[in-house]
Amino acid sequence: MQAAIEILWVDDEIEFLKSHILFLETKGYKVITANSGIDALEILKKRQVDVIFLDENMPGMTGLEFLQRLKLLLNETPVVMITKSEEEHIMETALGNNIRDYLIKPVNPNQILMSLKKILDHRKLISQATIEEYQRSFRELGNSIYNANTFEDWVQVYKRLTYWENSLQQWLGRNEIVEILQMQKETANTEFAKFIKKNYKGWFTGTVKDVPVLSPQLLRHYFFPLLSQPKMVLLVIDNLRYDQWIALKPYFQKFYKIEQEEIYCSILPTATQYARNALFSGLMPESIRTLKPDLWRDETDDGLKNEFEKELFQQYLSRNGIKIPFLFEKATNMKSMKRIDENPKRFLEQPLSVLVYNFVDILSHARTDVDMVKELASNEAAYRNLTKQWFEQSALHRLIEYFAEHQVHLFVTTDHGSIKVSNPVKIVGDRNTSTNLRYKYGKNLNCESNDVFEISKPEEVGLPRFNVSGTYIFALRNQFFGYPNNYNHYVNYYKDTFQHGGISMEEMLIPAVYMKPVL
């Protein structure tokens, strides 16, 4: 039998509320009374209650003073303030102290009951409403998945799936409805992979008219028109998925008003060497390799594969007739993040600043390599929550606030996303085959599955060919490639990790957002 909900009612005229108390007791609630804030605090030191009803105007200790003392006890019991006063400053102060409801005397029993239900059944009611709303939209969303024929169709499908993923997991945690949604998302990724296999080559050969904004066009299409602003920062958060952006969005909105929010398409491979170099250069990788050979690194070359982003960006600006001094900074480890945090003024010295921030990518790799991080980010929802927890305490969060205080406009984007992989696929290649888990480049590639995307003529889609017979093979959905040698160990190590390089909504459909400061 479920224990009765306990209410502590604090009022110096509690004897006049007997009818209300009796009404609540007939509804199954247990009511404890106190004639003063001091008595109430003594009660709370000895026992827990579920809700506190609090009179605001009491002799000795007012309701507002009681709230302050309650905080010192580290007591987070929901409080309903009941008062005769309708003065605005009292309401504002009470709400600022995180009361859960505010009632004006005289109150009737039904008002009290509704306030209780709003507090105690809040999560249950929202959970049920969310489930019912998803169930109503399930068939329509399913039809949208199977009928998606254009890139914009897939953007809308992915946005809706992300919305439901956030809503259901927020209120339900792990639940059979959440599992149904995950199955629907897997179906969507299967259909999205078919869409990419059917259309991707045509985006470059001109045989498909519906061509999205791709990595090389992103800045010219969305960012360059904004450079008339006196202070602008281009913030590239490496490996940021759309759902992670949605999770971080409220933190940005504390300081910024979102003017434009888009989803663009990362090129293949969805990996830094290709997608981010394309973003900063305005060129496809094969064009960089051909036209700027000193600024490109092949798969087998030593050194960082994205070492020349600043130079590529400078030349991109020049090709578009943009003559503007800029600062280019990269935060790739804790040392560089600390250096940026200690001297944010540098970002105000030029009209344009570019900041590449690699923490989400670091988090993704840490989740693969560090057992504790893997446990903290055991699923998609936990991965989003870990991203939020990092950002809330991060130097980047402080920097965003600093930018807003100094009226700096902000353009936030990324180079690619990532997907949680769980389906291993055996592949064989020569010793020079690339090592990425979601795509392979090499000669004589032999894959056990035909359900992959193979590009045998890389030049047709703007990708470099590093040898005469080299081909690219991309993993779809939640696949990842593994070699027959030591296969089981390899699979167990990488299964259920977040990877990028292949074809999925999470990797390819990524955010680009322009914001104006509101401070």
Image (cartoon, rainbow, N blue to C red):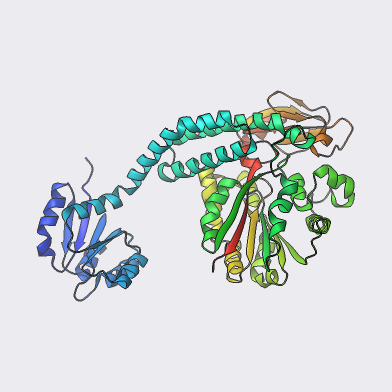
> The N terminus appears in which quarter of the rendering?
top left
**Identity of the residue drawn at 85% across and 37% down:** 465
Q: Position of residue 14 (x, y in %)?
A: 13, 64
Q: Judge whether residue 234 can be spotted in this image.
A: yes
Q: Position of residue 155 (x, y in %)?
A: 59, 40
Residue 89: x percent and y percent? 32, 72
Q: Nearer the viewer, residue 450 or 40?
A: 450
Quarter of the picture holding the C terminus: bottom right
Residue beneath the point at 37% across and 67% down: 96
Count of marks placed on residues: 0
- Residue 47 appears in the picture as rendered: no
Is 240 situated above or below 1? below
Is 163 situated left or right of 273 in this image?
Answer: left
Specify whether 321 is left or right of 175. Answer: right
Instruction: Please state which of residues 435 and 67 is positioned toward the viewer in this rendering.
Output: 67
Q: Residue furthest front?
A: 209
> Residue 118 versus residue 502: which sits nearer the camera?
118
Return the residue nearer the eye: 408 or 390.
Answer: 408
Tell me: residue 373, above or below residue 250: above
Left-right relation of 188 to 321: left
Position of residue 508 relative to residue 120, above or below, is above
The residue lying at 85 percent from left, 52 percent from top is 295
